[in-house]
Amino acid sequence: MITKDTGNYLFPEGFLWGAATAAYQIEGSSMADGAGASIWDRFSHTPGNMRDGDTGDVACDHYNKWREDIQLMKRLNLQAYRFSVSWSRVMPEGRGAINEKGLAFYDRLVDGLLEAGIEPLCTLYHWDLPAALDDRGGWLNPDIADWFADYGQVLFEKFKGRVKTWGTINEPWVIVDGGYLHGALAPGHRSAFEAMIAGHNILRAHGAAVKRFRQVGEGDIGIVLNIEPKYPASDRPEDEAARRRADAQMNRWFLDPLMGRGYPQELEDVYGEAYRDFPQADFDLIAQPTDWMGLNWYTRSVPENAPDAWPVRARPVKQVQHAHTETGWEVYPPALTDTLVWLHEQTNGLPLMITENGSAWYDPPHAIDGRVHDPMRVEYLKNHLKAAHDAIGKGVDLRGYMAWSLLDNLEWSLGYSKRFGITHVNFQTQERTIKDSGLLYAEVIKSNGGVL
Ligand code: LGS
């Protein structure tokens, strides 16, 4: 545990402090004002998919409460807000006709943020694929690269000069692993063959959107990757091989081709006959130069060889010596420093931003003082900020930090059971209460890390 006096963790001038959300997790009203359904509307309304039968029908009602939520951001001293756009709100069929009323929601939001002096960071895709496109194969259809670039163009043109920082796709690995390999997330498929193809088309779609952005957009664009570093479980060669497979399947599957290195060799070992090679032209499209990269970071893992664990043949060894969050993830901040240093090297010094970092804990409003005391999240936040600062000290070009999340929200198939917010949401009344972690974060921002 790092225990230094305050004042040792001042961040570089201009470091951008913010918080993040995603459309389906907070907006609610997903079918309002002419919007089309997304795969998450379908998935969450299919019995058996969601914990407690939860859906995003209402979520945090941000679609109606966005003004209030901007006020909340101001109280938190946020300088930036990372949000995602619901593709099927803007294009109900996923392609073709634009739903002006849906687009107008984001128009109001962006203007509201700018008026409040908060910089909007816009993610094009955070998992809510238009259902109409899923009917055409979704991420399995190679045409999706063009559909995605066309959708991106609508936003690039609409928000030119107002949104300066763009993210294409949030966490390709989670989309593929959850949506196409293990089926825990929409659209709920379980196929290694599909996973390989969906992953490739996600990367192609990213590349096509970046290319389009260079033609019609203005500002900076990049992708957002989840990286979970893999530490050795032992010095046995079979554990080292398992570690490499796990690292390739989760981290390098997407990072390597983005950096122009093609797929890691271990991916073939993981997927066997489902592994596919693709034309060089695809890899050229994927490796479009970008301006920055987003890192979503939560935990590390320590995989050991496990021949029965399909398809990676690795299983994490629980690190009982450390705390684990409500979602069962180990709390181990030094691994964030290591990841940032590693990513800095892997990307040849590309500007990086922590686009998500946070933790789920059980934290109801206190019965007596009505406040929300979340000491574990306070600790998590402090120690991960210090870890990020350490990485800057080691030469990493880290430009900002977005806390996950602004609000407690729909944690995908885990429903409302897991709360990641620095603001508590009462889902009966929609009342928002800033948690102790949020109050601390506001001080961190005001002092640019000085209070750490
Ligand atoms: O809410 C999501 C957060 C929560 O934890 C957000 O929408 C996603 O972008 C992101 O994936 N999020 C997230 N990821 C943590 C992944 C940890 C993986 C640990 C797997 C252990 C089996």
Image (spheres, rainbow, N blue to C red):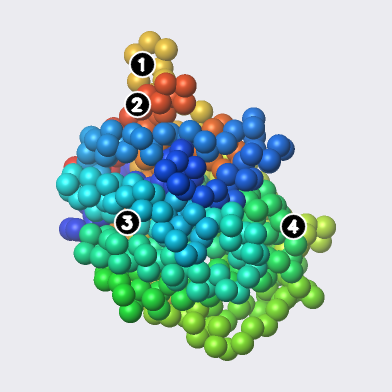
Number of numbered discs visible in the structure rendering: 4
Label 3, label 1: how far apart the Cα atoms are: 32 Å
Checking the image for residue 433, the label placed there is 2
Residue marked by disc 3: 121
Q: Residues within 10 Å of mark 3 (few under 14, many from 20)?
A: many
Kindly report which numbered mark, 1 or 2, lies closer to the viewer in this rendering: 2
Q: 397 or 4: which is nearer to us?
A: 397
Residues marked 1 and 2 touching at CB (< 8 Å): yes
Label 1, label 2: how far apart the Cα atoms are: 9 Å
Residue marked by disc 1: 370
Amino acid type indicated by mark 1: Gly
- Residue 173, position in %: x, y? 58, 62
Q: 65 or 171: which is nearer to us?
A: 65
Q: Residues within 10 Å of mark 4 (few under 14, many from 20)?
A: some
Residue marked by disc 4: 190
Amino acid type indicated by mark 2: Thr
